Image (cartoon, rainbow, N blue to C red):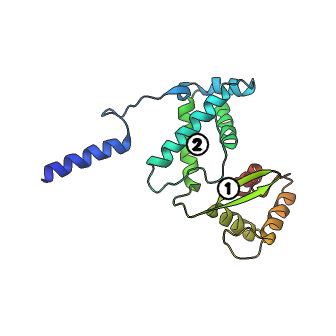
Amino acid sequence: MTRIISMLIVLMSCQAIGADKNGQFAIKGVGNVGCKSYVSIIQSNNQQKYLFAGWLNGFITSHNQHLIDTFDLTSWENVETLGNYMYQHCILNTEKSFFQAATDMVTKLGTEKIDLYKSAVTFSANSKTYVVYDQVVMRMKQKLSDLNIFSGDINAEITTNFKDAVKTYAHNTDIEIESIFDQQLLFKMFHG
């Protein structure tokens, strides 16, 4: 019985790793394309850029499904922001494949991931609808509070006080925003 349980554990751990017994696996699609080619495609605004965006979304979805304690690696980033990350990373790492660059990005995203889905808020501005995880709103409030721009409860409620604090932050950092969840603003707030 112990031997059967040991075999099951080994088989299950191999599936979790997702590679053959030599640690190798097939990389599909544009994951095989070099960063140098990706940079060229982006710079020339080639329609192939959409293949990379689709591949990247699938890559992240796969990680969301298989990483422990992970609901969403991209807590606030949209595909355009992720594409910009990839572009900048590939400029600096032209010898890497798109897959390798995406793996680097996933490693960095893991530090800010949504580990457990709680809820999300919906917010409309300028004819666009944004769905933002509660945890992101709370991180924003905490950051604004740390900067003495926001005073109030650190929760996911979108109040006038919170909106005003975000606008003040945007003004103070010279960022023009379309909404309080503007990608450039969130990048500056969390990584600036």
The number of numbered discs placed on residues in the rendered structure image is 2
When the figure is inspected, residue 172 is found, relative to residue 148, above or below; the finding is above
Q: Would residue 54 be seen by someone viewing this image from the given angle? A: yes
Which residue type carries mark 1?
Val
**Residue 35: x percent and y percent?**
61, 28
Q: Secondary structure at mark 1?
A: strand
- Quarter of the image for residue 104 reads top right
Q: Which of the two labelled residues, at mark 2 and mark 1, occupies the earlier sequence position? A: 2
Q: Which callout, 2 or 1, points to the residue nearer the camera?
A: 1
Estimate how packed mark 1 is, as few (under 14), some (14 to 19) or many (20 or more) residues with alpha carbons within 10 Å: few
> Residue extending furthest front?
127
Q: Which residue is mark 1?
A: 131
Residue closest to the eye, 107 or 158: 158
Q: Would residue 192 be seen by someone viewing this image from the given angle? A: no
Q: Which residue is mark 2?
A: 105
- Quarter of the image for residue 131 reads bottom right
**Residue 124: x percent and y percent?**
77, 57
When the figure is inspected, residue 17 is found, relative to residue 146, above or below; the finding is above
> Residue extending furthest bottom?
152
Seen at 38% across and 31% down, the residue is 24
Q: Secondary structure at mark 2?
A: helix
Marks 2 and 1, Cα distance to the nearest angstrom? 22 Å
Which residue type carries mark 2?
Met
Seen at 66% across and 40% down, the residue is 85
> Residue extending furthest left?
1
Seen at 19% across and 52% down, the residue is 5
Estimate how packed mark 2 is, as few (under 14), some (14 to 19) or many (20 or more) residues with alpha carbons within 10 Å: some
Seen at 58% across and 49% down, the residue is 109
